[in-house]
Every structure is written in C-alpha cells, then in structure tokens.
Image (cartoon, coloured by chain):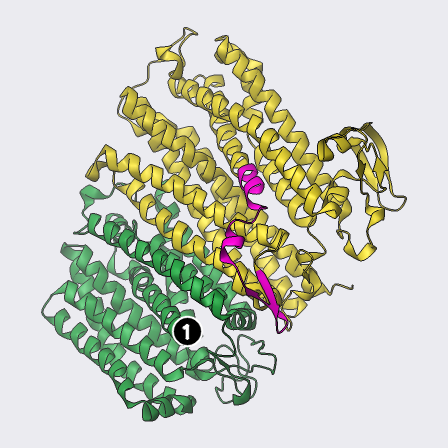
Chain colours: A green, B yellow
Amino acid sequence: MPTLWFILVAFTLVMYVLLDGFDLGAGIIHLVAARTDSERRLNLLAIGPVWDGNEVWLIAGGATIFFTFPLLYASSFSGFYLPLIIVLWLLMVRGVSIELRSHISNPVWFSFWDGMFFLGSSLLAIFYGAALGNVIRGVPLNAQGYFFEALWTDFNPFSANPGILDWYTILIGLLAFVVLLTHGANYIAVKTEGTLNERARRISRAGWLVTIPLAILASIATFYVQPQVYMSFTQRPWGIIFPLIALLGLLGAGFFNLLKRDLPALLSSGTFLLGMLSSAAFSLYPIVLPAVNRANSLTINNASASQYGLTVGLIWWSIGIVLAVIYFTITYRRFSGKVTAMSSQGY
Amino acid sequence: MHMDTSTIFSRIQFAFTAAYHYLFPQFTMGLALLLVILKILYLVRKDERYNSAVHFWGKIFAITFIMGVVTGIPMEFQFGTNWALFSSYAGNIIAQTLAMEGAFAFFLESAFLGLFLFGEQAFGQKWHLFSAIMVWLGTWASGFFIIASSAWMQHPVGYTVANGRLDMSNLGAVITNPWILPQYSHTMSGAVITGAFMMSGLGAFYLLTKRNIGHGRMFVTLGVIVGLLASIFQLYPSGDLEGQQVTRYQPTKLAAMEGLFHTESGAGIVIIGQPNTNTGTIDNPIIVPNVLSFLTYRRWEAVVKGLDDFPADQRPDTIDMTYYSYHIMVGLGTIFLAIMGLAALLLWRRRLFSTRWMLWVLMLATPFPFIANTAGWYTTELGRQPWVAFGLLRTVHGSSPILSTGNVLFTLLGFAGMYLLLGLLYVMLVVFEALRGPTAHTAEVEKPEESEDLGLIGENA
C-alpha cells in the first residue's frame, strides 16, 4: 500500500509539473515572445482558463503527501521553511499578475504586471528545480526525522550542513528553468498563430539546444551526488525505461519543432518531463527523503500513515482524481484551438 | 506550560494569514449564491440588466476569488512549515479532509470558473448558468471540507492512538462529526450575510449618488431580501445550535467567551463590560440575569460552569480576546438583523429607495460582516486553546521542532507586507470596478427612472 501511494503521489506531482509547467513556461517567455500589448494579452489568454486549475494539482499533491506520509510532509515542509514560504509569495505575485493586469488600462500598469509575471514564473521554475535537487541530494535529517536547512551555506552538496542552494541544486534549478521554458514555448506555439507562434517556436528551439548539455551535465552530477541512484538502476535494471522515455521526449521535442508540428512537440516536451521526474522517483524509491546520515532517511515505510487511513483514502482519492480528469478534459476541449484577438474577452 | 517565542510567532502568523485569507472566501461563497440567483432571474425574466449584473459581479467575484486562491495556498502549507509536530501527529486524519477539498472542491471550482468567466459567448446561456451553479457548489463544498477539518480539531473523533500519534479508525465518523453541522450552517450563512451586505451596500451607494439607478435598486432589493433571511438564520437556528454545542463539548470556551469567571446557577448574560482577569470580575457590567442559563440549558436556574471550575492549564490562554471576539460577533449579528429587518420593512412599504438615511446605513454597514465573521473565527479558535486538537494535543507541543524565532518572524513580517499590498490592490480594483459600474458591461444606455415604485425585482408584483 505505501508503494502504491508513492506512485500516486509521484503521479500527482508529475501532473502538476506537466500542466502548471507550461503556464510557468508561458510566464518565462512572456516578455520575449510577446512584445506588443495585444500579443501579451494573447499569451495570457492562452493560459487564462486553465492556469488556476493546473495549480490545484500542487495543492492536491501537498495534501496527498500530508495524509499518506504525514512525517514526510511535516519534516520536509518545516525543514524547507524559508524556500517554501518564498515559493508561496512567488505564487501570489504570479497569480495576481495574471488576473489583475487587465483591470486598469494603463501602459505602466501593464508593464509592471508583465514584469512580475515573468519574474514570478522564472523564480518558481528555478526554486522547483532546486527543491527537486535537494530531495535527490538529501538533507541533514536528525534521528526524529526533522531538519532545518538554510538557503545557502557553503554551496557544497557534500557538506555535513548543506544549504538549499549549492552547485548541484542550482544546476537542477537551471535545468528546470530551461525545460519549462521550452515546454511553455511549445504550448504557446500550439495556442497561437502568426508572429507569436513563430517566436514561440524559435524560443522552443533555443531552449531545446540548451537543454541537451544541461540535461547531460545534471544526469552525471546526479549519479555523482547521490550514490543511491546508481544502486537503484543496477538492482532494478528495468528502470532504465524511465531515462529512455526522457530521451525519447527530448528527441521528439527537437524533431517536431523542426517540422513545425507544435502539438507533437508539446507532447514530446511533456514526455521528457515525465521521463526525467519518473527517473528521479524511481531512483530514490523506497526512500522518500534521503538523509545526509543514511540511517535517518525517511522511507515509504517509516513515514507512511496507518493501513486503514491509506485504504479508505485510496477509495475517495481515486474518485476525486477521476472527476478532476473529467473536468480537465471538458475544460481543455472547450478551450481547444488557437486564441485570437477576437476572443480576447477577459484579458 | 511555557510557550517559546517561535511557537508564539507561529500562532500569530497562522491566525493572521487565516483571518486575512477568510476575508475573501466569505465574500465569494456568499456572492456565488447571489450570482446564481441573478443568472436565474435573467433567464426567467429575459431582462438584459440582470445579465449585466451577472457580468459586473462576476468580475468582482473573479478578483476576490484569485485573492482567496493565492492567500489560501499558504494555509495548506503552514500546517507543515510551522506545525510539523501536529502534522505528523494528526496528519493521517486532518489531512484527509484537507485533501478532499482539493480533490472534490478546488478542481471543480477552477474548471467551472474558467467556463463561467470565459465561456458565455462561445457556449451559450445554459452552460453559463450551469457553470455558475457548479462554481457555487464548489465554493460551498470547499467550505464544508475546511469546516470538517476545523471541526476535528475542535472535537476529535474517529481515531486511535498508536506509537505516540493518531491513526484514523473511522472516516465516516470524521465526515459526520457532530461538530460540523452547526459550524457549517453558521459559517455559510455568515458568508451569505457578507455577500448580501456588499450587494445592498453598493446598490445603496448607486442610489445615493443617483447613477446606475436600475441596478442600484436591483442590488438593494436582492441584498436586503437575502440579507434578512441569512441574518435570521444566523441567530436562529444556527447560532443557537453553536451555543448548545459549545456548552456540551467545550465548557471552558463557553465560560471564556461569556466572561463567566465563577460557576453560577441562574447565570446572567453579559451584554457589555470589560473582563478583569486579575480580579475575576466584569468591569462596568450590564448583565441580564438568568439568560445565559436559559440559552445554554433551557432552564432559567440551571448551573453554568465558570472558569474557576477548571484547572488553570485547561483554560484558554487568552480569555479577554475570546470574550471580545464573541461579543463583537454577537453584537454585530444582532445589529445586522435590525438593519435588514428595517430595510425589508421599508422595501415592502415601497419607501426604501427614497429613504436616504436607510440607504446611508446600508452603505456604511458594508465592512461590518467581514469583522463579524472574523470575530466568530477568533472566538472558536481562541476558545479552543490551550489545545491544538481539543483534549489530545496541546498547542505548545504541536509546533515545528527546529524552527528558529528569527525565521518565523522573517516570514511573518513578509506576509504582513505582502498582504498589505495585496489588500490595497484589491480595495483599489473593487472600488474601480464599482465606480465603472454595471452599465459598462452592456451596450444599453440606462434611463434614470424617477418614480419610486419599481425596483427591478418588484416589477412584476
């Protein structure tokens, strides 16, 4: 049962990254891809009806960890105290910038929120990447399963007292930034036509080119920083499927971009994200939060909730997620197709 | 039971961010219902002005909703950041209802709000009404799951204790916690009061400034009718149910909120007065004898337990604040009933739109439901102290173990600054929309009508 929940939690978080990932990406490319006011409106309109729903996957993921692995939730949220609260502030700035921009018709007002939208989205992408880097690298858990990490200490991932930011986690943060930028550019290319579409496609290509060396570098660094990763792949060789999925996605994203097939390119960048994240989850399992001192690591067994709670939770949770998938299908189908200046009601 | 500063700052931060957050959902939950009513009126009466009212309030709803979303996410996360020991102790139970909110309410709301705000032209009126109803149900479902979580902290059920933490033993018991129904009905009608006062208040402003007169009458009429019904329901039965429940399960909270220092038979109710915790008396009291006994036990001579009946470490640690929160809430609730009763009487006599002083009262009353709802939450949560899970885990034992005071104060100050800016922005934008008015949302030009009779709602009467 804890293994099943490990997979479901990973699924929820992957859904979050795939969905909110492209609207974060839309924010990252907002200033460069969309130059005029009407282009920026279109960029916002492309994510307008869906970004808020995408963000619900984050809340669902957090709450799901909370009731299935209470100790993991308590330990990681209190240990990552500062970066987590900063992420909350960034989510606020970004959410507000999307929704309030249109309410006052003034160029200074527009520019301010455009800047905030870009800044919030970019920093969130980097923070998410760094967070993942921390979870892979490990944290200084004590015997009770708690820790506290400063934002930075000596920037050394092998330190006994590592910070949130070290050269490894910053590397993963940059990778996340570039990958989400590419993913977002692919989404905007799907949703728009004309110059915006062409610029988004060019940005996607640039992002893709930068992704390749960063992804190689990050993969090597991961094996170097966290020996558990190598062990997982040697003990369970079938797991090689996950990096292969990532590779397939990466190749597809570049290939379809050259063919100007925007939707397959978007699905490919999504596949790449899926492959990378599931590789990370696979290589950590059964650990959910590695400790600097290995004996203190949180695993699916010592962090999970009771059998009864996990079982009843599975019943209603599954119903809820099926409903969510139905709503999302309705929404995305209703709002499928390109956004045009005609339809810019709302933004 | 010494409480360290880190825990105190965590309490302040949670109380501040929760109270601030709840300013927005109480308005959206009330307004969602009013939007459904306006949309139905439009479809039944085919009068464009109802639909422009839907667009107008829909815009205000959207701004308020987004404020609720961005200030709500921190609530979900602060259990872990600041209350880690409580989270690992009770997470298996309390987080099930929190996660249900995400699974059953948030997905619903976000999906249909998108359709409601963006989809009218493309998908037609039936979809628009349907999405309005789904948004309303979503916001109210969200309220239910939060109340269920809060109710469990007030009155824990459905658990077993194992290895120093709680395991869930009965999900049904958690969802049907007897604490939920009184608290939920009281909270929801409180939200409707907020929505109704906002609507009637803005309508009164339009009538007083002689613009958007047709809409002004519509808003005042709808606001007063809904506001009166909700104000009555707020006092009875929901408020009465809450009183009974506190009497039964949390006598310490009852004693603190009523300022009852000593056990009495035939206890009186304190209308006005300042609790003096040094002497255990009420200063400058105005007390109606025997009423508290009657309200709690339905007998004029019943014995009501005072604070002196409980050991000091079982009493709420902020008796004065609990007392004031409760008295502000009840006092305002009574005033709301009087205002809406009087306004409804004038509406019925067809004199409301020309009775300027009443319109002034309606307009100036607008902020007070926010205060009353906030005070209500302070009553229930401060009165729960010194427990985080009533009778099971003390608040001092629930905070995060290695969190330093400096870090909590940093984020508390950050939240304060951020929320100040958000609040200013919000007020600015709502005022801006209100000044632009509902007619900006239709092509029609409004004809000011000078004759008194017809609010739009009364037109067919």
For this orientation, the residue located farthest to the left is: A259
Magenta extent: B159-187
Query: Does dot 1 land on a helix, a strand or a loop?
Result: loop
Instruction: Give the residue displayed 11% in from the left and 71% down from the top.
Output: A258
Residue sitting nearer the eye, B229 or A260 = B229
Question: Crowding near pointer 1: few (<14 within 10 Å), some, many (20+)?
Answer: some
Mark 1 — on which chain does it sit? A
Q: Is residue A239 above or below residue B301?
A: below
Task: Tell whether position B178 is magenta.
Answer: yes
The reply, left or right, for residue B315 in relation to residue A226 is right
Q: Is residue B35 above or below residue B306?
A: above
For this orientation, the residue located farthest to the right is: B279
- Across and down, in percent, residue A178 comes to 30, 72
Instruction: Give the residue displayed 60% in from the left and 29% down from the top.
Output: B236
Q: Is residue A239 above or below residue B381?
A: below
The reply, left or right, for residue B33 in relation to residue B254 is left
The reply, left or right, for residue B408 in relation to residue A55 is right
Residue at numbered disc 1: A1
Q: Is residue B452 above or below residue B318?
A: above
Q: Quadrant of the C terminus of chain B?
A: top left
Task: Tell whether position B440 is magenta.
Answer: no
Q: Quadrant of residue A212?
A: bottom left
Q: Quadrant of the N terminus of chain B?
A: bottom right
